[in-house]
Image (cartoon, rainbow, N blue to C red):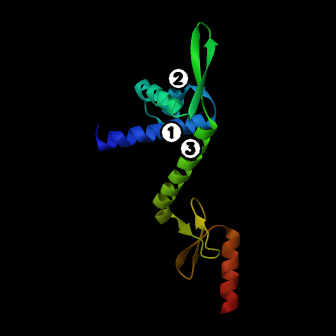
Amino acid sequence: MSEVEDFISDFSRFFIFTILYEGPCHGYRIINEFKKRVRKEISPSLVYPFLQKLEKRGLVKHTSKMTGARERKIYELTDDGKTFCVRIFRRFSKLVSVAIEPSLEICAHCGCKVYEGGYFEEIEGEMTTFCCVHCANSYKQERNSNQ
């Protein structure tokens, strides 16, 4: 398996955790949710063995439910599974923070990080970033009072 395929496989497993964290579901729903959200097919040969591995480790449990003539396994995170998810979500959020940090704008007044949107105003010929119009007004008032 190539490095890219390994990464995508690991991402797929991570995403399976996010789906399970939202609540109990069966394997077919995991496959459909993955396809809908990621816009990529995921193989049942990845999903079901992974669910079995999680169950052996005590992170997932299943109950059986009859749907028509078929028995359907409903998978659910155990308490240990939920704790594990919180840990990996925190770790992932730190990685995402590192990745997006360089692209964030900083408010010239309060110093908060502006992820999306923000308010921009030209001040003394230079485009200045603010988180909101209120910070822009406060910034201009402070500059005028200091001059």
Residue type of the residue flagged with mark 3: Phe
**Image spot of residue 122 (x, y percent):** 57, 75
Q: Residue furthest left?
A: 2
> Which disc is residue 84 wearing?
3
First of labels 2, 3 by sequence position: 2
**Residue marked by disc 2:** 28
Corner quadrant of residue 113: bottom right
Mark 3 burial class by Cα count in 10 Å: few <14, some 14-19, many 20+: some
At mark 2, the secondary structure is helix
Mark 1 burial class by Cα count in 10 Å: few <14, some 14-19, many 20+: some
First of labels 1, 2 by sequence position: 1
In this view of the protein, which residue sits in the foreground, 22 or 134?
A: 22
Q: At x 33% / y 43%, what residue is drawn?
A: 4
- The answer for how far apart the CA atoms under marks 1 and 3 are is 14 Å
Judged left or right of residue 84, residue 102 is: left
> Which disc is residue 15 wearing?
1
> With respect to residue 39, does 145 lie above or below?
below
Circles 2 and 3 in contact, beta carbons < 8 Å: no
**Image spot of residue 85 (x, y percent):** 57, 43
Judged left or right of residue 74, residue 15 is: left
